[in-house]
Image (tube, grey):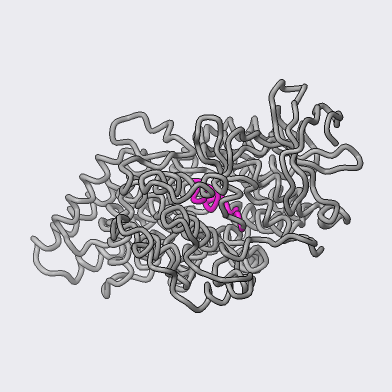
């Protein structure tokens, strides 16, 4: 293989062999850059179904863009061989560095922080690594750590073939639930916890002479105390490692929270994959991704020209923002009417009216992205009426969108527990908790909250958001069934048709997905998320001109910079955009 040419790649020296195939250094003569070529083991491309699954996972991984994730440039075929062109890492692996002993505490924490940020970025997009270990953490020429082979271990596992001589996830780094086949974002966090312990202690947290012994220890025994091996490790660091090694995946810290806590310990913020471009004004809310949020947070169907206009402005600031506006014209109006009809004296009625006016203004400021004004109005409403659920929702949403997730979660939880709250208000509180989970990429938790919201409010938006979250939590079949029920109850819903298409794409039913997206666009020709989804579907089908046309229409809706950048990455990965 060395010193040969395949397509436009001049293949150089062999860099190594792994479970998925051989890796060579190469030169991309078309783009004039050095790359690494990973040639896929024949077992993974032996049949059409396995090859298709591998290609799908590789293209998903190629869409990731983060300073601590090695870039996957392309999935190539030369008629006989399948290989991946990816970023060439000139430094050693973390395994090589660990061979020289434990790392200084600040260095270990900084490396774990950067890897956790990379994991959080991927988890938000529904991609799980499944094989985090020191061999898959490499250093570039500037010494920055990068996660290798994102999504490819999952692709290998999707194959029905047995890969001789390889394991999907080295035993020492496998989470307890992995042995039962329950692999998800928490499994990546557990593996990173093992790596962090190893960096600090110079040894693994679970001893074992063979893989079976290791797996037994991981499932049944407590990890070795970190500070016994490394007394100078601060107690709070040991506590954080233990939270990452929690055996119950639902109680385990998630990647985004781990990155934040490591940022606090190191005094340096974890790197972000996307800037909040577009929030240039002082106090403006950070931009949210249209594809993930806008279609799923649609308004109630009654009394709502302002809500429709809010959606058309494409300010994807979250379901609760629009829900708060919906409450202003439906639930909120009912609450105020009851106060005016049955409440106390004139002073009580005046306070209720004033609180509602302030809360409505807060919701309007939220739709415009004016955080400071929205917060001031919501806090003023609560000062007038401390029991105002609407004001509490609006304040919680401001806090969430300005990075104060803990306080926001407390307020949302208060709304869910309010004894006097209406079902719609309590549902909005659960949806707010789901938003926080989605911010951190913990889709199973988001699904749990949205199920509770749906039990209280099976509205059109309830069907849509729960269906979307189920797809992102790798449950497209359940999502499709739910969305079909939603369409039976709310025929003619563009968001429900769009999300049904998203679910069908997750089930590899591309023809069905295209049909659902077409229905969504027939109902709303300018529906940005549907345009973006159709562009991805056309790119996957090899219709590059059609994908580019949909991209142009999507850009015409004035999406946020992060939205358009993500679509461009997906289209480039599929070869539809240069």
Q: What stretch is highlighted in magenta?
A: 118-130
Q: Residue at x 41, y 54 (%)?
A: 200
Q: Which residue is drawn at 65% across and 63% down?
A: 476
- Camera-side residue of 449 and 68: 68
Question: Of all residues shown, which one is farthest toward the bottom?
Answer: 220
Residue 144 is one of the magenta-drawn residues? no
Q: Percent x, y for residue 294? A: 50, 47
Question: Of all residues shown, which one is farthest toward the front?
Answer: 100
Q: Percent x, y for residue 432? A: 39, 59
Identify whether 411 is placed above or below 108: below
Q: Which residue is drawn at 35% across and 52% down?
A: 261
Name the quarter where the N terminus is drawn.
Answer: top right
Left or right relative to 539: residue 452: left
For residue 178, say whether it is visible.
yes
- Camera-side residue of 415 and 66: 66
Q: Percent x, y for residue 489? A: 59, 67
Write down the quadrant of residue 175 in the picture. Answer: bottom right
Total numbered labels: 0
Q: Percent x, y for residue 363? A: 32, 48
Question: Of all residues shown, which one is farthest toward the right?
Answer: 79
Identify whether 268 is placed above or below 450: above
Q: Which residue is drawn at 53% across and 75% down?
A: 217
- Camera-side residue of 433 and 232: 232
Identify whether 50 is placed above or below 543: below
Left or right relative to 513: residue 276: left
């Amino acid at each position: 293989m060395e010193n040969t040419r395949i397509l436009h790649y001049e293949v150089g020296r062999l860099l190594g062999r792994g479970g998925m195939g051989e890796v060579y250094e190469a030169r991309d003569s078309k783009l004039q850059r050095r790359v690494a070529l990973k040639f896929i083991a024949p077992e993974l491309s032996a049949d059409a179904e396995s090859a298709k699954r591998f290609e799908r996972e590789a293209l998903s991984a190629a869409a990731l863009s983060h300073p601590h994730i090695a870039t996957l440039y392309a999935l190539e075929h030369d008629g006989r061989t399948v290989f991946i062109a990816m970023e060439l890492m000139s430094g050693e692996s973390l395994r090589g560095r660990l061979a020289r002993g434990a790392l200084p505490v600040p260095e270990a924490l900084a490396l774990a922080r950067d890897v956790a940020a990379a994991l959080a970025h991927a988890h938000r997009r529904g991609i799980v690594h499944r094989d985090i270990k020191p061999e898959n953490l490499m250093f570039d020429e500037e010494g920055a750590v990068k996660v290798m082979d994102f999504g490819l271990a999952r692709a290998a596992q999707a194959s029905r073939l047995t890969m001789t001589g390889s394991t999907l996830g080295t035993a020492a780094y496998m989470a307890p639930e992995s042995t039962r086949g329950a692999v998800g974002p928490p499994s990546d966090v557990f593996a990173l916890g093992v790596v962090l312990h190893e960096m600090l202690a110079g040894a693994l947290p679970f001893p074992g002479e063979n893989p079976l012994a290791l797996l037994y220890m991981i499932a049944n025994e407590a990890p070795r105390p970190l500070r016994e091996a490394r007394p100078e490790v601060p107690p709070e660091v040991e506590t954080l490692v233990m939270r990452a090694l929690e055996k119950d995946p639902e109680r385990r810290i998630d990647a985004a929270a781990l990155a934040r806590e490591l940022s606090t310990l190191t005094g340096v913020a974890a790197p972000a994959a996307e800037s909040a471009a577009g929030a240039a004004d002082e106090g403006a809310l950070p931009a949210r991704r249209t594809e993930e949020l806008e279609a799923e947070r649609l308004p109630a169907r009654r009394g709502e020209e302002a809500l429709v206009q809010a959606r058309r402005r494409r300010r994807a600031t979250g379901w609760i923002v629009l829900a708060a506006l919906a409450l202003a014209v439906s639930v909120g109006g009912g609450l105020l009417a009851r106060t005016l009809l049955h409440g106390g004296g004139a002073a009580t009625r005046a306070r209720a009216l004033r609180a509602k006016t302030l809360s409505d203004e807060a919701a309007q400021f939220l739709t415009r992205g004016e955080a400071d004004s929205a917060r001031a109005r919501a806090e003023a409403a609560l000062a007038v009426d401390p029991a105002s659920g609407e004001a509490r929702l609006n304040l919680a949403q401001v806090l969430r969108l300005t990075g104060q997730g803990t306080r926001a979660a407390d307020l949302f939880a208060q709304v869910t527990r309010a004894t006097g709250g209406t079902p719609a208000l309590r549902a909005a509180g659960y949806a707010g908790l789901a938003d926080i989970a989605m911010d951190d990429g913990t889709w199973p938790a988001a699904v749990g909250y949205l199920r509770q919201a749906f039990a209280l409010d099976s509205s059109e938006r309830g069907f849509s958001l729960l269906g979307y979250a189920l797809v992102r939590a790798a449950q497209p079949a359940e999502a499709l069934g739910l969305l079909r029920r939603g369409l039976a109850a709310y025929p003619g819903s563009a968001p429900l048709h769009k999300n049904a298409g998203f679910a069908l794409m997750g089930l590899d039913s591309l023809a069905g997905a295209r049909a659902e997206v077409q229905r969504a666009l027939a109902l709303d020709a300018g529906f940005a998320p549907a345009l973006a989804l159709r562009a991805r579907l056309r790119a996957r089908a090899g219709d590059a001109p059609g994908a580019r046309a949909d991209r142009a229409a999507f850009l015409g809706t004035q999406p946020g910079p992060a939205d358009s950048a993500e679509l461009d990455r997906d289209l480039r990965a599929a070869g539809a955009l240069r």
